[in-house]
Image (cartoon, rainbow, N blue to C red):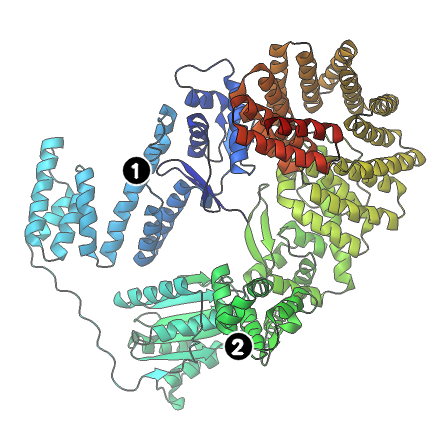
Amino acid sequence: MTEIRFRLLGPLTVDIDGHDVALGGPKPRLLLAALLLEANTPVSTDTLIDVVWPAEAPRSAAANLRTYIHSLRRALAQDRLERGPSGYRVRVARHELDSTVFADHVTAARDAMARDDPATALDELAAAESQWRGDPLPDLPHHHTWEPALTRLVELRLSARELRVRARFSLGEHRAAIPELRELVAGHPLREELWAQLVVALDRCGRRAEALDAYHEAERVLREELDAAPGRTLNAAGAALASPAAPPPPRRAPAGGRSLCQLPLDLPDLTGREAEIAELTALARRRRSANAPTVVVLSGQPGVGKSSLAVHVAHQLRGDFPDGHLHVDLAGTSTEPRSPHDVLAELLRSLGTPESALPPTEAERAAALRSALSAVSLCLVFDDAASAAQVRPLLPGAGTSAVIVTTRARLPDLTGVHHLGLDVLGPDAARQFFTRLVGARRVAGEPDAADEIVRRCGRLPLALRVAGARLAHRRHLSLALFAERVADERRRLDELRVGELAVRACVELSYARLRPATAAVFRRLGTLGPVSFPSWAADAVLGTDGDEALDELVDAHLVDLVGTDATGSARYRMHDLLRCYATDRADEADHDSVRRMVEGYYTIAATAAARMPVRFFGVTPTPVPDGYWQPPGLDRLVRDPVAWFDAEHATAAALVEWGTRQDADGPAWRLTTALTPYYDLRNRWEDWLRTGQLALEATRRADDPHGEAIVLRDLGQVHVYQDRYREAVELFERAVRLFRTTGDPQGEAVALAGLGTVARIRGERHHALRHSRRALALFTTAGDLYGEAVARIAVGTVQLAEGRLDEAEATFAESYALASAIGDRHRAAHVLQRQALLYRERGRLGAARQRLDQAIAVFDDLGDDHCAGYAQQSLGELCLSSGDLAHAQLLLGNSLAVHRGSGDRRSEAVVSQRLGELHESLGHHAASREYYEQALALWRELAASPQQSVVEQRLARDA
């Protein structure tokens, strides 16, 4: 996945995958800076214009602003800049912007200090400070609207530095705090707290004379600058200088006698847990120094390495807890978890209590254990806990002992302890662990296969250990062959077993403890495939409220809560190996219940498609059939239909595939047609093609000729976008026949319009006009005003191409009036674009430019970058012909990026040719030749002989 980073804390920079992005001149940079300072919040167009042109804005400022926006979109290669009703916003995740990364680290540091964890606070503050590369945005003139945001950042940085001093004080690191305190008081001499901290730090380091000097200097500054005396905090620090220095607390002597150690063997190859080890050992040592007990709960999914980490940390702490190390298996995942009553007896016996002296009740035994632990310093590992109720009686109340609990459940009701959730290993750590197990030479010989095995193991430590053990003992087995075996989900769990180690058996223990309803949700969600899903998915597969079951799966680490999508819905995902296990356990009833998911997705997608900002020119199926399952809160989910599709399209496409495999052909093909308007808006041709082909087969199995006609028409359209005109014509013609057979004149008109588009592109104007007029007649008869507007645009476009300008102007005027009357802004913008071409033919360049500016503004407002790219191409060609080469270069460059992104090779060829002409005019012969050669290659691919000949002549002349 592409990683992008925006940086404001220093000169403005953006990098993608570690490479700096060229943002252009000062105006696009000012624009981006203004948006980033208010990230994810709309900034009005008026404000942006004032930022970019603070003295006086040109008349074309709004149009130029749109050009800069498109330029930035092209540079970022991602859809990050969004237009709203009153302006623009930049969409940035918190981890992608240095100012929010900085703020989040500071917040985490404050949280760490609140829970008495200054070591973690220092780590967070170091990470926060690393985001700063100098003053914010020193390379740009600061606009007055930036001051509040920049002031907040500077103040937060100062607050973070003060917090770092307090953290160092908490750790007794007074000497390390002195240099920073001297720098802080020099920069902020009126902050009394800083002076007080400097006095204390100097005194604690035995530098009392310097502490006195600092106190007197603070007195002088406050008197001269504020005519004030020191306050209570500084006075207290000064008064302490008159008292003898307190000696450091004595270290606790090691306990005498025999030291217990029941810890299992420490694994020598534990990998990728360095941060967790450092966090837990530092916590235990800090709490022990404060004469307080430590209780840590390690939770995570089966096989994530909780027990291994707990044992390793306990071994690391052997020198810190001199009275011994105990290890108890609580058997939480067994059919009979151990009772606290029995575990307490075992612990008391280990600590020297004779059998005859054991108290009879659980409460009395717990009290006896607390008394015993208050007098010793032990490290105890409680492995595989079932619940908070099982663990609570085993915990110390005082003393300096440390307890590490491992559990597959989250135990949120165990309060007052340090919770640490373990995730799978990171990509680098997982590969390193696998390499340790298999051998560096073997991995170096087959690096791609090794990466594939690591990926198929889901970076789960247990799975990697099993795979590594199998390969280590089968030297003749190639990594590629083993990667092929584990790629098959049906046999993956069988492959991940060696001796007593088995992923399946590990998951089985957690599955066996689930309630029947929760187990059913687990199995059914597992059959969805490797996708994320919303919370209502549990309702669908269960047929009733599934929130309780889903919460239970999350608490058991069998389902992960991965975040919140753009609609505000929580999203979940299942680890691949857990999903394989769930799928293995699924039966026919489970598969039948998942059909409700497909129905639910179709119900939402159909509703969202009807509310899209751009009306799709296609055929929708009949209304949602009676009996289809509908998720709760439908209106809330589709409040922003595009956001819903953005969040759900991958899962919906996976459900199309699932439905066509599991006898759910009806909802599957309908879901495909509801996804098509989104695919059209976002240029997702490959998704459109893949789901469309599955849907076509589904309509035939369902014996639904009208559904087949709809899918054929949609497939014809995506073939047009991919310049596959022969196949598009075949699909459109089959659709026309089926629409005619099933008595749908409106559908027939849509398919005929597609045939007209192909004929026009091919230069077959007579056929294009015939198809378009026939479509217009059918739309008019059917009373489809939207279709009528489209058909009139098509007729006018052919008239324009034939030079019949008066007829074309009249047709465009009729179409614009119709589109405006029915509120179809998208079609009206298309008319504006065609009118601009007509005005250009008549030499009315000012009017043409005005129409194109209007069209681009509408396309931007509707979020249709595809059509905006075509309009920018037209405006760029207009600027090129009028000699405005700088503007032409920017516009044509933007449109070229759009065409490449959408796969429109014909338009890409045209724009490449225009850029060749532009650079030729500028005398940039190398760049000109490069663009001409790109255009020539594309025209050859498209077998467009006339255009190919023109470019060949240009290149021959230049040579």
Task: Answer whether residue 394 is visible to the viewer in this image.
Answer: no
Residue 234 in which image quadrant: top left
Q: Residue 52 carries which label?
A: none
Vertical arrangement, residue 680 with respect to residue 409, above or below = above
- Position of 264 compared to 174: left or right? right
Pick the front one: 90 or 473? 473
Whole-Å distance between the Cαs marked 2 and 1? Answer: 52 Å
Q: Mark 2 points at which residue?
A: 331
Q: For numbered disc 1, what is the local secondary structure?
A: helix
Q: Name the residue under label 1.
A: 155
Amino acid, disc 2: Ala
Question: Which dot, 2 or 1, sits closer to the camera?
Answer: 1
Pick the front one: 312 or 549? 312
Pick the front one: 286 or 836? 836
Amino acid, disc 1: Glu
Circle 1 packing at 10 Å, graded few (<14), some (14-19), many (20+), is: few
